[in-house]
Amino acid sequence: MHLVLLGVLLGVLEVSGAPDADEIKYLSGLSKQPSFKHYSGYFSVADNKHLHYWFVESQKDPANSPVVLWLNGGPGCSSLDGLLTEHGPFLIQDDGATLEYNPYAWNKIANVLYLESPAGVGFSYSDDKKYTTNDTEVATNNYLALKEFFRLFPEFSKNEFFLTGESYGGIYIPTLAEIVMEDSSINLQGIAVGNGLSSYELNDNSLVYFAYYHGLLGTSLWNDLQTFCCKDGVCNFYDNQDVNCSTSVTQAIVYNSGLNIYNLYAPCAGGSMGTINCLVTNILNNIVNFSKLKLRGVVSLFKSSRLDPPCTNSTPSTLYLNNPQVKSALHISPNALDWVICSAEVNLNYNRLFKDVKKQYLKLLGALKYRVLVYNGDVDMACNFLGDEWFVESLQQEVQVQRRPWIYFNGETQQIGGFVKEFTHIAFLTVKGSGHMVPTDKPIAAFTMFSRFITKQPY
């Protein structure tokens, strides 16, 4: 029934311009124009919403390379951040005007579709300018966008297809996959989620352990946390009703104000004081009060940390993408808002319907044909590795390869990239020394991991 209704919607969508109208002919900031083709335009989806995309063809045999969808998180953050600062073919420089080619771009080996979703994010917009949405609606519209992509680019309809994303993509990707796997016309092969939100409870609970074992909490506070939040060896820092526990958790988070939550060991862009202290206090209040809010506009550590990303500098990307010459090259609609890395309006009006995505993962794994990768930079505190490791373990899949180091070549020597544990059809992998944005922090390791994922090689 779900796909029948979607089929009706697809039948009434307005036909967009042909792909050649969306081709980017000249992009400013580059020393030379790319040898590969790339396109930018809009996919019209349900309710008169228009999702902006930027599609970069593979630099190596696009006709036979897989197609990869990339979604950044938020909710409310732009996937062009992934293109310009993580694994796109060119990376924005500090002057906000220059692009440099990325030697570890994911489109070296894949056709990559960067989609700004939902409407209200980046250059995506709605005709009625209403940007209240939810997880289910976003999954449906992302699916409709994919159908539009394959309609406009039919030459890629038989290629292997992968869904990838990071952060709140931990919700976006499996909920979208649940729909896509029912559509035999899309050659879905697997999904990969980086530093994703898989479970609010596991993410928030594991953070306190992460903080203590990374030397961020003192022994006295840790003892209080154990006394007031734990019973019979099981700790609940997530929705514990004990007032003393709530107080101790508050102290634990405020103690770390000013740290870069996206990379514990990286400096904080703009400095560590002032608004960051207020932000962290709000984060803590949200964790403590989560049980009262539950699924009605869930406010948790994750939500607050991504509303206006702390310790990050999005000025170069903002300057570049709002340059009129660039907007013209990208065929940006005059109805689109100015580009910002994350939309506060979308974030604050977003209804979170899923407290975890265990059901979606089990459905994917139950099909016994999809390759699933959950990977984490191991010094991220927004979506820490321990919470995602717990989540993967909770799926109770058969272990195929016990936890081991994985190796990559850094250009000079073989190095340990992190650690990996492989189960039937799913792997959990860490990237050593990386924060929330793995391709930014560890581009060579990230490219190696990505290459092994899409070519179905051992990690």
Image: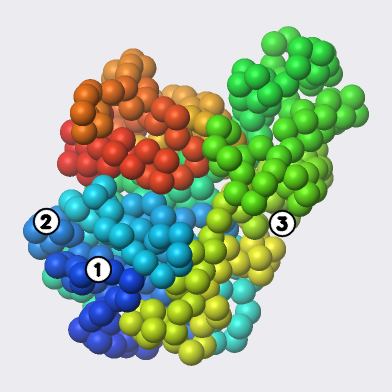
Q: Which residue is mark 1?
A: 31
* Position in image of residue 212 (x %, y %): 67, 20
| Mark-to-mark CA distance, 2 and 3 | 44 Å
Q: Where is 299 relative to 228, above or below?
A: below
| Residue depth check, mark 2 versus mark 1: number of the one nearer the observer | 1
Q: Where is 275 relative to 265, above or below?
A: below
* Position in image of residue 70 (x %, y %): 37, 56
Q: Which residue is mark 2?
A: 60
Q: Quadrant of residue 427?
A: top left
| Residue depth check, mark 1 versus mark 3: number of the one nearer the observer | 1
**Residue 452 showing in the rendered view:** yes
Count of labels in the image: 3
Say which mark, if any, is on residue 297.
3
Residue drawn at (17%, 41%) of the image: 455
Q: Considering only order in the chain, which callout, 1 or 2, is on the residue closer to the N terminus?
A: 1
Residue drawn at (71%, 56%) of the image: 297
Q: Secondary structure at mark 3?
A: loop
Q: Where is 54 relative to 224, above or below?
A: below
> Disc 1 marks which amino acid?
Ser
Q: Nearer the viewer, residue 63 or 270?
A: 270
Q: Nearer the viewer, residue 419 or 421?
A: 419
Q: Nearer the viewer, residue 207 or 102?
A: 102
Q: Nearer the viewer, residue 447 or 168?
A: 447
| Residue depth check, mark 2 versus mark 3: number of the one nearer the observer | 2
Which residue is outermost to the right? 243
* Position in image of residue 219 (x %, y %): 76, 12
Q: Considering only order in the chain, which callout, 3 or 2, is on the residue closer to the N terminus?
A: 2
